[in-house]
Image (spheres, rainbow, N blue to C red):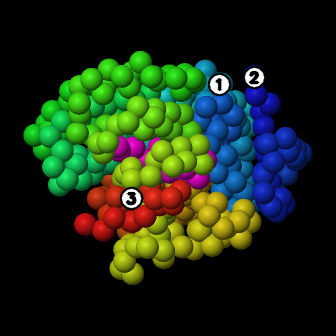
Amino acid sequence: MPEANTRISASIVGVLGVALAVTFPAAAMAQVKIGLVLSLTGPAASLGIPARDTAAMLPKQIGGQQVEYIVLDDASDTTQAVQDTKKLISEDHVDAIIGSSITPNSLAMLDVVAEGQTPAISLASSAKIIEPVDAKRHWMFKTPQTDAMMASAIMAHASEHGVKTIAYIGQADALGETFYAEVAKFAEIHHINVVASERFNRTDPSVTGQILKIMAAHPDAVVVGAAGTPAALPPKTLKERGYKGLIYHNHGVGNNDFLRVCGADCNGTFLPASPVLVAAQLPADHPARRVALDYIGRFEAVHGKGSVSAFGSYTWDAGMLLQNAIPVALKAGAPGTQAFRSALRDALEATHGLADTNGVVNMSPTDHLGLDQRARVMVEIRDGKWVYQPH
């Protein structure tokens, strides 16, 4: 079991350390408490670590209230994510939760946040995390683009490049399955046939068997539905086996750890991505450009040039949502009360016209993401760098 964990107080300045633990007496002044459930270890660590590092940059005071951030590691495991969520709600009495980093864990948290009537902002991709907005999802929001938004971008790009057949290889979990469903739907819209569909586990050392089956079907393009460094295995194997068609990733690979692991084997591959990955290359009028460049500047000042990932930006955007909503919720009650948590949920749902690192957020009772198609850009990987592909 991972150590639980990191507590970030308003008095702490600097980068989070996983082993850091600072405890304050119960008699301390009332403050807003934000819990974070992040995949800091395990196969999805490359997603959780930049989120943790970004959490250290979130504001320590909002609306005149001190803000405490409590970071727990879910170890990329659904059971641990549920335990962490229960602890944050029942023991730490947080006012809101950010996380988890991955789709299976975020889905597993739905029942807990609904029962605890605590608003949560997922950092994972699947639309199923927030759709449809039923009794459970009433309390859940998210910042990353949905798999539907990204699958539609892939299929539009493939169609423009003459692709008639595709194969799919995805993780054998909720992310892989939900992304496949969207890929297949948009492939049909673009009159592209799916000729093979394979799965692999995040911890698998090889996908040779699956790739051989895919290559036997001779697809014009292959779509990889996976996140983090494990997503490098299919494209590397395809290149090793001499595949010459187009290769697409989903937006779960938007960090430098993936580029490092995949190396030259990812040259010439494509993905629909968060605008933050190519912020400096975006047109001056892109709604995400200014905010994304501001975040990049802040993050790189601490972690070095080229250190930004999409997964950190999703945490920054969650912080922006809370910074916008907390002053509104404070009018309804004090932090730590159900009146405050319910008002915070309502204020998140009422977010309108908020520019963040990915686009402009316009939420509603039926849309707990609020992003439109401006929140995605097509990117090519060239020599270990993200290259913006204008339409």
Q: In this view, does 390 lie to the left or right of 382?
A: left
Q: In this view, does 345 lie to the left or right of 147?
A: right
Identify whether 99 is placed above or below 363.
above
Q: Do the residues labelled 1 and 2 touch (CB within 8 Å)?
A: yes
Residue 153: image x %, image y %?
27, 51
Under circle 3, the secondary element is strand
Nearest to the eye among marks 1 and 3: give it: 3
Q: Is residue 179 left or right of residue 87?
A: left
- In this view, the residue farthest toward the front is 242
Nearest to N terminus: mark 1 or mark 3: 1
Nearest to N terminus: mark 1 or mark 2: 2
Residue 2: image x %, image y %?
76, 28
Nearest to N terminus: mark 3 or mark 2: 2
Nearest to the eye among marks 3 and 2: give it: 3
Numbered-mark total: 3
C-alpha distance separating marks 1 and 3? 34 Å
Question: From where the camera sits, is residue 231 visible?
Answer: no
Identify the image quadrant of residue 359. bottom left
The label shown at residue 80 is: 1
Residue 253: image x %, image y %?
49, 46
User: Label 2 belongs to which residue?
Assistant: 1
Q: Which residue is drawn at 72% across and 62% down?
A: 303
Q: Which residue is drawn at 39% across and 65% down?
A: 388
Q: Quadrant of the C terminus?
A: bottom left
In the image, which residues are magenta?
247-259
Residue 254 among those drawn in magenta: yes
The label shown at residue 379 is: 3
Amino acid bearing label 3? Val
